[in-house]
Image (cartoon, grey):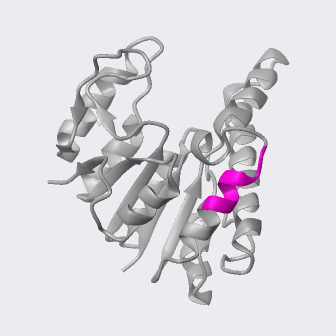
Amino acid sequence: MPTVVNIGGSVIAPSSGDERFEEYAEALSSVDGELYVVVGGGGAARDYIGIARRLGANEAVCDEIGIDVTRLNARLLISALNGSAYPEPPSGYEDAKAAMALGRIVVMGGVAPGQSTDAVSAVLAEYVDADRLVFATSVPGIFREDPRVDDSAEFVDEITPSELVELVMKIELKAGSKSPVDPLAAKIIERSRLSARVVGGDEPGNVLEAIRGGAAGGTLIAR
């Protein structure tokens, strides 16, 4: 059965170096079965979007710029996978599913304005009937508050999709806070009855363990 992995841009591209791409390529290339990877834009996307806003671009244009950066990150990971990946980032869900016919890892970025790569991963998992969805984030799982803002935030070992929707809406409404899974992705997980796991992505080995269904830590999202 297919697996979908979302790698946050701040995880795979925390700087302009290539080390994290190589580390993830080594881990992902050892996975058996159908593997789809969605890569975020991270700091580079935020920087370019900020510049675009200052230059007067509207939000739809800013979204397109962010998508372009995610696709650049996807291309870098494809390069690091050195033949183990489909050679182009698919531009949509149907294209991604068709690309899997070659039996290689499919790596993609954003798809449409207004849709984060979190949401892309959830929709893709729904589209390809994935049995596993993994979010590799800059925090070790889901907390009841944003741990980057509140040092006393409570860690959540397991949560239902409906509880997740309620929690991330509460977190996102607070100024300066951001949940590891955004509200749209949470709603898609809820409607599709997906099981998912949120893990810290700083160590690709943790993500690999989650892909294989092992004791990867993090937070399990399940009914």
Report if residue 124 is visible in the image.
Answer: no
Numbered disc total: 0
Determine whether, in the image, residue 123 is placed left or right of residue 23.
left
Residue 105 is drawn in which quadrant? Answer: bottom right
Q: What is the residue that sits farthest to the bottom in this orientation?
A: 102
Residue 41 figure quarter: top right
Return the x and y of residue 97 as percentages of the image width and height: 53, 76
Quarter of the view holding residue 130: bottom left
Is residue 18 one of those drawn in magenta?
yes
Residue 34 located left or right of residue 65: left
Of residues 176 and 203, the one nearer the viewer is 203
Query: In the rendered image, which quarter contains the N terminus?
Result: bottom left
- The percent position of residue 179, horizontal first and vertical second, equals 40, 31
Task: State whether residue 222 is above or below residue 92.
Answer: above
Residue 25 image position (x, y, % from top left): 63, 66
Residue at 46 percent of width and 49 percent of height: 136
Find out whether residue 70 is within the magenta segment: no
- Residue 141 in view (yes/no): yes
Can you say whether 133 is above or below 146 in the image?
Answer: below
Towards the viewer: 123 or 212? 212
- Which residue is situated farthest in the left direction here? 223
| Rendered position, 14 above or below 25 | above
The part of the chain drawn in magenta is 17-23
Q: Main secondary structure of the magenta part?
A: helix
Single out the residue that lies furthest toward the top.
175
Q: Position of residue 57 (x, y in %)?
A: 79, 24
Q: Residue at x 74, y 70 (%)?
A: 88
Q: Nearer the viewer, residue 5 or 139?
A: 139
Q: Is 72 situated left or right of 187 in this image?
A: right
Q: Residue at x 55, y 68 (%)?
A: 27
| Quadrant of image for the C terminus | bottom left
